[in-house]
Amino acid sequence: MDPNTILGAERVVKTFGGIVAVDRCSLTVAPKSVTGLIGPNGAGKSTLFNIIAGLYRPDDGAIWFNGKRIDGLPPFEIVRLGLTKTWQIPHELRNLTVLENVVLAAKDNPGEHLLNLFVKPREVVRAEKMWRARAREVLKLTQLDALANEHAKGLSGGQKKLLELARALMSDPSLVLLDEPVAGVNPTLAGSLMDLIERLRQSGRTFFLIEHDMNVVMNRCDRVIVMHQGRTIADGTPASVKSNPVVIDSYLGG
Amino acid sequence: MAIDTGTLTNIGFYVFVSIMFAMLALGFNLQWGYTGLFNAGIAGFFLIGAYVAVFAITPPAPPLIIGGIKVYPGHLGGYSLPLPVGALVAMFVSGAAAALVALPTLRLRADYLAIATLGFAEVVRIFAINLESVTAGTIGIPGIPGPIEFNPPDAFLNTMTKVAVGAAILLGLLIVLQFMVESPWGRVLRAVREDEEATMALGKNTAGYKLQVFALGGALMGLAGWFFAITINYVEPSGSFAPAVTFSVWVMVIVGGSGNHRGAIIGAFVIYGLEWLSVQLKDLAPKFLADTIPYIRLMLVGVLLIVLIIYRPEGILRERKRVLR
């Protein structure tokens, strides 16, 4: 596999009953990039994300992450390898506080193993303390620190999007799949969210995002992949994709 | 007004039976209140615990045949083991049974777990009724040893011992369970309850947690079965382990407050309290009313449940918010 790709999909197929959601879709994502995934509703973008994250098992094809084949692995093992996804519709854990939501996303917390509670209680307390401090930093980064001890169900739609990002960052991923990160977020907040993503990219993380906001896609992504009817139909710089007649025809409109 | 030992014995009976229900409610609360796993077969794990304990702690009981007629079919085991050993064996076997039932269904939607456990509990009970050589069938197993045998027999001391043993176990359980659910481990359980798919995407092996919790809850129900055996001193499968036991425990947890251990215990004392009171009142009430009192109790429980669901859906004690420092 090309060393210059962090993520690769090879002829991935997923059908639901008679509907072919993803149809022999192949694509690659370069490390330390912000890569956009666009396409009309029903193009198979979210389904592809769910396949990559291990939530759906593809009917055919392969997914590679950092040179390792990951299709068929359970989601929790994929997260361990450093690949995390956020949800298009926020999946906040409603009756947990914002801080609990974020602490939960820590990857190696010994206190999450029942036996450790009794065998090494000191290490459990120490690690939990460390992860809480880390979670507070992440909350500061995502401007949610003032809401740390509120139930997640009380957050606004935009704040829930921020919580999604905060949880993703907490697992210290090398690749983050963001499913419409700024949909429903006000323009100012959306701007600072994308600034944050840019800063995180500079610190070495890769972002692969689905987005319908063309401002975000054209100004913030290095590369844009276009999906239509389950396949990639275009792949290139924002400018080249924007002027691609096939893309204009199927998605952007003339 | 002095309270005589007879009244105290009577109240003591109410307390230790409530403690037994509280053990069942704690098990179900761990599964449902904390983790969102619906168990419709509480009675089955309770039965397994009771019978396994009985096999372990009773003296040998061979079949009794008088004049060619089988008077008593005998039962399995009869190892005369100490009571605490019986408790451990009962917890282990009930927990293992819960894990076995859960294993094929945990990956499926929640309703399948409910169907599987409901079916399992009835199958277990029907086996217990019909496998006479193992369980003595509907004749039941009498003479199960209690915590301390007083000589000469003393009903008051006997009851108070049972209350003391039960209260000590319940307190211990409350402390350990509280420590467990307030840990990072417990936080994952609550996350699974809120949204299993999201928890999975956050890197947790949710199936593993569900299996652990189902087994632990089953073990608590097994412990309740052991406590039933050593306090009632008689087990019989058709009535004591009927599906109605499962339904009672649901009501206890919902009324007391799911996701709160103390709530589950209070729920057990309140709901069994209504049953116990209705029995007490039956003796005092005028004759024309006496026969209807059990039905009035059932109505009362129903009304209580409806009023609670409308005005306080979280139960008497609500789950508290965890403010982390």
Image (spheres, rainbow, N blue to C red):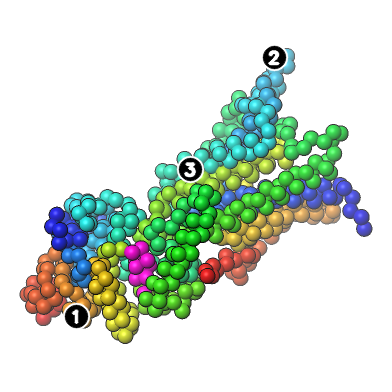
Q: Quadrant of the N terminus of chain B?
A: bottom right
- Which quadrant holds residue B218? top right
In reply to whether residue B212 is colored magenta, the answer given is no
User: Whole-percent x and y of residue A250?
Assistant: 13, 72
Label 3 neighbour load within 10 Å: few <14, some 14-19, many 20+: many
Which residue occupies the foreground of this view, B279 or A241? A241
User: SS for tag 1?
Assistant: helix
Q: Residue A225, percent across and down?
A: 15, 68
Image: magenta residue range: A162-172
Q: Nearer the viewer, residue A138 or B293?
A: A138
- The residue beneath circle 2 is B68
Q: Earlier in the sequence, mark 2 or mark 3?
A: 2
B272 horizontally vs A33: left or right = right
Q: Is residue B1 left or right of residue B13?
A: right
Front tag of 1 and 3: 1
For disc 1, the marked residue is A219
Callout 1: chain = A
Q: Residue under mark 3: which chain is it in?
A: B
Q: CA distance from mark 2 to mark 3?
A: 43 Å
Closer to the camera in the image, B99 or A28: A28
